[in-house]
Image (cartoon, grey):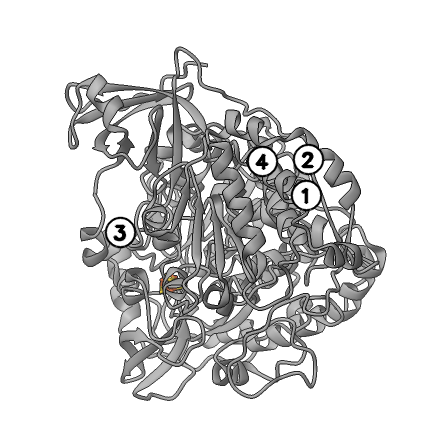
């Protein structure tokens, strides 16, 4: 470590330099013993500037206050059309994680004895490329893969996707967005013809009936909840969730359905609406296909069946159907409680079907609206070059491949004709030995992947693992053969796309520490050392890439070729797609899709998509008699807490130790009180946590926040068959009182 410290110290004394010219030139003239230096702030020093937040998909605007050109504090932007002067605790504390002591400041290479040693960037890049190229030469191109993230700007993820698939010849790559949004993506594609969340946040304020499904908005998207609180129409707020969450507590109606009974519940709602004649027949006839088949299908899903499966009384279900019928502007919203399911796609489509049936699409205050998770999950959905070819195109479509090749000046043969493996298949590939080299960027699967107990061992099987992250301390970075230090939010520029399709600008307001580089520059450097740097000559800066992405988007539903510049995005308060040439309005806008009733299928009609419910893979039984639910714990925690744990303020706002919520009756039966210990065991392993006795969970259920590394030792690796999204929200566990804090075991009870 002494060596690293000395190198950092020497580097920090060096002058900064203005970035320009080809990367190789910059490498040559960069100061310091390691060749690569740092980049000057783009903007002139000024009192304040703006940037969108880099945590969640809400995409709040922040005012960043500068001293000598560097950020010293921030406040929520009052005029930004997303947050209207509000921010959640994470947003207020967005600068703090940048100064954490475990920031990566220099590449680290694992030596034969397992110690990590600091090495120059040139050596790191040469090592990475030679190791991956050697693996590909011996085992084929598909033996090296990547796993990316929804946390980096669109320009960076597009560059990564193009570099890996077109330049490095990788076949398989996926993003951690698979864990949160994949089911919504597939649902929209099949129902609407394109992955297109139709709403704008103003709809929260305009609905008179708001139906929230599997969404604890108060905690997970607090600013969106604030938008609901501003609704002047005294809306009915219906929460459908097994837990009495903070959102359910504040709602006007809570339907505490049994876990994974949602599909039957929604089919029964459709049954009632159809049976009562509460269908918008004009809308259905003019704008949809498959209604007749759907109405026949739901006949089997009677209110009585739904009552037996979900535990919701028949009269209550009928009353909910009546509310939806009487609502003038009904909006349906869902998030991870739906998506992270063994049948998430069909549940999402069951919600979409309700909106189609009742004509609640394309009008103010309506919509079948998936709320996204990460700050740039929407950018990843369109531009990561994983599930889609760049720009929402399809790998399998010849004319799409031709267009992408033409825009990028590539030969068509360089564009793959098939989609690569999804995240779970890549992990399986590591296990089977088909994947031998892996590049992980800005995500922490050793903590977050479902049934993560085995993932460290799996990653250990790789011939070469590269982890690129802000922190050298994450569970995943620690097992890497090579660690690359990356700049974080606020230390680079680019754009994010938020849940309502608003493209917002991220600005560089701080220097990255030591030799940490923007992911953009790391990708450019890898391209140079790989030998395909020429392919990316035009990708000279994030804004240059944005121009390329605009050309790729042209003619697609997500067309944003009408945005003149980064500056326009900044001045407009973000711009929602689509934005065609000549469409740019003056000032902030609220745009929703399908106002003309035209969907993206060739016949312009939306589809009713439905299927019989499937059983969960791991039902409870005598031995594992509790259901484990997982989710967001507090608004101050983000995912694996890689960043939020760096803030003393945020740490104080949530329990440090892992805990499980348990119903008072179950707790009484076990003789356990809040603060005492529970031993929770699944077929994957066993953990010890604090008990949190609360009636917010039902009997027979326990709830654990996803932020603690213990949680995914228990979860079961089951997946939606269409989206391949993990089903984090249901597995069978045994729960007992622990007399004292027990050492956690990894026993496999298979
Ligand atoms: Fe940032 Fe999301 Fe909080 Fe807004 S709600 S401040 S985008 S974390």
Q: Residue at coordinates 19% horizontally, 26% vertically from top-left?
A: 677
Ligand 1 has an atom within 8 Å of the beta carbon of the residue at disc 2: no
Front residue of 492/554: it is 554
Query: Which x, y percent locates residue 435?
Result: 60, 36
Mark 3 and mark 1 lie on one chain; the one further toward the N terminus is 1
On the question of residue 527 being in view, the answer is: no
On the question of residue 699 being in view, the answer is: yes
Per the model, the C-alpha gap separating discs 4 and 2 is 11 Å
Around disc 3, counting alpha carbons within 10 Å, would you say few (fewer than 14), some (14 to 19), or many (20 or more)? Answer: many
Mark 4 and mark 3 lie on one chain; the one further toward the N terminus is 4
Query: Which x, y percent locates residue 146?
Result: 57, 47
Residue under label 2: 298
Nearer the observer, disc 4 or disc 2? 2
Q: Is residue 636 above or below residue 290?
A: below
Question: Mark 4 and 2 residues: CB-CB less than 8 Å, in contact?
Answer: no
Identify the secondary structure beneath mark 4: helix
Query: Which x, y percent locates residue 528?
Result: 59, 64
Residue under label 4: 263
Around disc 1, counting alpha carbons within 10 Å, would you say few (fewer than 14), some (14 to 19), or many (20 or more)? Answer: some
Ligand 1 has an atom within 8 Å of the beta carbon of the residue at disc 4: no
Q: Residue furthest top?
A: 622
Q: Is residue 37 above or below residue 125?
A: below
Per the model, the C-alpha gap separating discs 3 and 1 is 50 Å
Front residue of 347/279: it is 279
Residue under label 3: 645
Q: Residue at coordinates 46% horizontally, 33% vertically from top-left?
A: 312
Q: Is residue 176 left or right of residue 744?
A: right
Mark 1 and mark 4 lie on one chain; the one further toward the N terminus is 4
Front residue of 495/622: it is 622
Residue under label 1: 274
Identify the secondary structure beneath mark 1: helix
């Amino acid at each position: 470590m002494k060596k690293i410290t000395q190198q950092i110290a020497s580097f920090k004394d060096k002058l900064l330099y203005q970035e320009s010219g080809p990367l190789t030139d910059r490498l040559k003239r960069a100061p310091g013993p390691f060749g690569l230096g740092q980049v000057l702030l783009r903007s002139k020093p000024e009192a304040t500037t703006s940037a969108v937040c880099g945590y969640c998909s809400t995409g709040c605007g922040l005012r960043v206050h500068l001293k000598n050109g560097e950020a010293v504090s921030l406040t929520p932007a009052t005029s930004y059309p997303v947050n209207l002067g509000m921010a959640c605790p994470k947003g207020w504390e967005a600068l703090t994680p940048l100064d954490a002591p475990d920031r990566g400041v220099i590449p680290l290479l694992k030596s034969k004895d397992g110690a990590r040693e600091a090495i120059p960037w040139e050596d790191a890049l040469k090592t990475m490329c030679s190791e991956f190229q050697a693996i590909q030469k011996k085992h084929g191109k598909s033996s090296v893969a990547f796993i990316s993230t929804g946390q980096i700007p669109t320009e960076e993820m597009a560059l990564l996707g193009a570099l890996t698939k077109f330049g490095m010849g990788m076949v398989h790559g996926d993003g951690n967005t698979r864990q949160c949004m994949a089911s919504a993506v597939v649902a929209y594609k099949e129902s609407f013809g394109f992955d297109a969340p139709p709403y704008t946040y103003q709809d929260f304020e305009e609905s008179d009936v708001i139906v929230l499904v599997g969404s604890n908005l108060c905690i997970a998207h607090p600013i969106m909840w604030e938008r609901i609180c501003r609704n002047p129409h005294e809306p009915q707020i219906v929460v459908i969730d097994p837990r009495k969450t903070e959102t359910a507590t504040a709602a006007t109606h809570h339907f505490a359905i049994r876990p994974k009974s949602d599909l039957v519940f929604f089919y029964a709602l459709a049954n009632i609406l159809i049976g009562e004649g509460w269908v918008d027949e004009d809308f259905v006839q003019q704008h949809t296909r498959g209604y007749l088949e759907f109405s026949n299908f739901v006949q089997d899903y009677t209110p009585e069946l739904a009552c037996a499966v979900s535990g919701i009384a028949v009269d209550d279900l009928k009353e909910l159907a009546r509310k939806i019928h009487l609502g003038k502007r009904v909006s349906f919203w869902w998030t991870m409680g739906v998506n992270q399911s063994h049948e998430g796609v069909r549940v999402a489509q069951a919600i979409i079907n309700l909106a189609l049936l009742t004509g609640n699409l394309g009008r103010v205050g309506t919509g079948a609206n998936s709320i996204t998770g990460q700050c740039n999950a929407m950018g990843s959905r369109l531009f990561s070059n994983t599930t889609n070819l760049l720009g929402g195109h399809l790998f399998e479509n010849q004319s799409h491949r031709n267009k992408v090749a033409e825009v990028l000046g590539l030969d068509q043969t360089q564009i793959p004709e098939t989609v690569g493996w999804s995240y779970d298949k890549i992990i399986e590939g590591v296990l089977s030995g088909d994947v031998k080299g892996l590049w992980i960027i800005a995500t922490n699967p050793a903590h977050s992947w479902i049934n993560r107990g085995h993932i460290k061992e799996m990653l250990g099987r790789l011939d070469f693992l590269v982890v690129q992250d802000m922190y050298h301390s994450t569970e995943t970075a620690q097992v890497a053969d090579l660690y690359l230090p990356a700049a974080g939010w606020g230390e680079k520029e680019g754009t994010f796309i938020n849940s309502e399709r608003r493209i917002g600008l991220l600005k560089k307001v701080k220097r990255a520490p030591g030799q940490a580089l923007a992911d953009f520059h790391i990708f450019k450097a890898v391209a140079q050392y790989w030998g395909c740097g020429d392919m990316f000559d035009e990708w000279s800066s994030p804004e240059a890439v944005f121009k390329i992405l605009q050309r790729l988007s042209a003619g697609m539903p997500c067309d944003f070729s009408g945005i003149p510049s980064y500056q326009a995005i900044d001045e407009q308060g973000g711009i929602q797609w689509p934005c065609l040439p000549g469409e740019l309005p003056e000032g902030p806008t609220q745009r929703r899709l399908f106002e003309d009733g035209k969907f993206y299928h060739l016949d312009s009609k939306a589809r009713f998509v439905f299927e019989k419910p499937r059983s969960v893979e791991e039902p409870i039984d005598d031995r594992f008699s509790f259901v484990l639910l997982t989710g967001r714990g507090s608004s101050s925690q983000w995912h694996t807490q890689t960043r939020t744990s760096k803030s003393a303020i945020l740490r104080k706002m949530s329990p440090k130790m892992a805990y499980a919520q348990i119903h008072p009756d179950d707790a009484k039966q076990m003789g356990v009180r809040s603060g005492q210990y529970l031993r929770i065991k699944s077929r994957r392993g066993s953990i010890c946590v604090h008990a949190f006795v609360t009636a917010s969970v039902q009997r027979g259920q326990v709830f654990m926040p996803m932020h603690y590394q213990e949680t995914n030792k228990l979860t079961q690796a089951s997946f939606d068959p269409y989206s391949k999204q993990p089903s984090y929200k249901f597995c069978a566990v045994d729960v007992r009182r622990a007399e004292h804090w027990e050492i956690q075991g990894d026993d496999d009870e298979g």
